[in-house]
Amino acid sequence: MAERHELRVSDRDRQVAAEKLRIAHNEGRLDFAEYDERLANAYSSVTYGDLDRLFVDLPAAGGFEVAHLSPGAPPATPRAARPAPRTVPAEPSVLAAMPTALKVLWIIWASVVAINLTVWLLVSLGNHGPDYFWPMWLAVPGSVLLAVTVGVGATRRDSGQSPSGRSPEGE
């Protein structure tokens, strides 16, 4: 009779090995590149020896026993799996949901307002009293920009687009 490492593995054995590799990856024992390479090797394994080589440097991960790769053995299951902690996704900020073009326009508008306010303040100080407050006219393009921003946000919400501009199905 052939030795164990020379016996051919079944699809079920390959699935068990893949699960064991996934657990090792989740525990931080394998980085993604190693996990990907070993997973490909697990699915292309022909014999138990091929599968055994994938676990030489790994302890029995997640409560799996090494004997789970013996012929005819049912697939092992983890002893006690801890439920993953639930995280509540944060609402995206107003800026995160805004298209890049609008972000740029808001930055330009805010810079122009800051410069105009500085110039008005310096002129008023130089004249020893407040001059006509001409920076107020920057509120006109600011209100137009606000209306466009609100309109774009409402359109995106109605069409179901994500903040990145792609529809949820494309993500």
Image: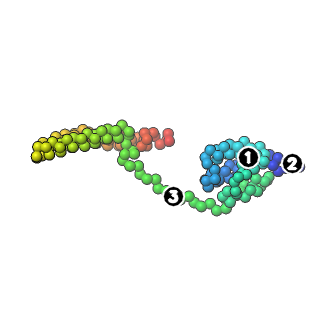
Specify whether 110 is left or right of 36: left
Count of marks, rendered view: 3
Residue 2 image label: 2
Specify whether 6 is left or right of 167: right
Q: Residue at x 39, y 45 (%)?
A: 96
Q: Residue furthest right?
A: 1
Regarding mark 2 in the picture, which secondary structure is present there? loop
Amino acid type indicated by mark 1: Asp
Q: Residue furthest bottom?
A: 80
Q: Residue at x 45, y 39 (%)?
A: 166
Which sits earlier in the primary sequence, circle 1 or circle 2?
A: 2
Asked which quadrant contains residue 108, the reply is top left
Check disc 1 and report the residue beneath it.
11
Q: Residue furthest left?
A: 128
Q: Residue furthest top?
A: 101
Regarding mark 3 in the picture, which secondary structure is present there? loop
Which sits earlier in the primary sequence, circle 3 or circle 2?
A: 2
Task: Give the Cα separation between the discs numbered 3 and 2.
Answer: 49 Å
**Front position among marks 1 and 2:** 2
Regarding mark 1 in the picture, which secondary structure is present there? helix
Q: Residue at x 64, y 46 (%)?
A: 34
Check disc 3 and report the residue beneath it.
86
Amino acid type indicated by mark 2: Ala
Specify whether 44 is left or right of 7: left
Does the rendering let one see residue 12?
A: no
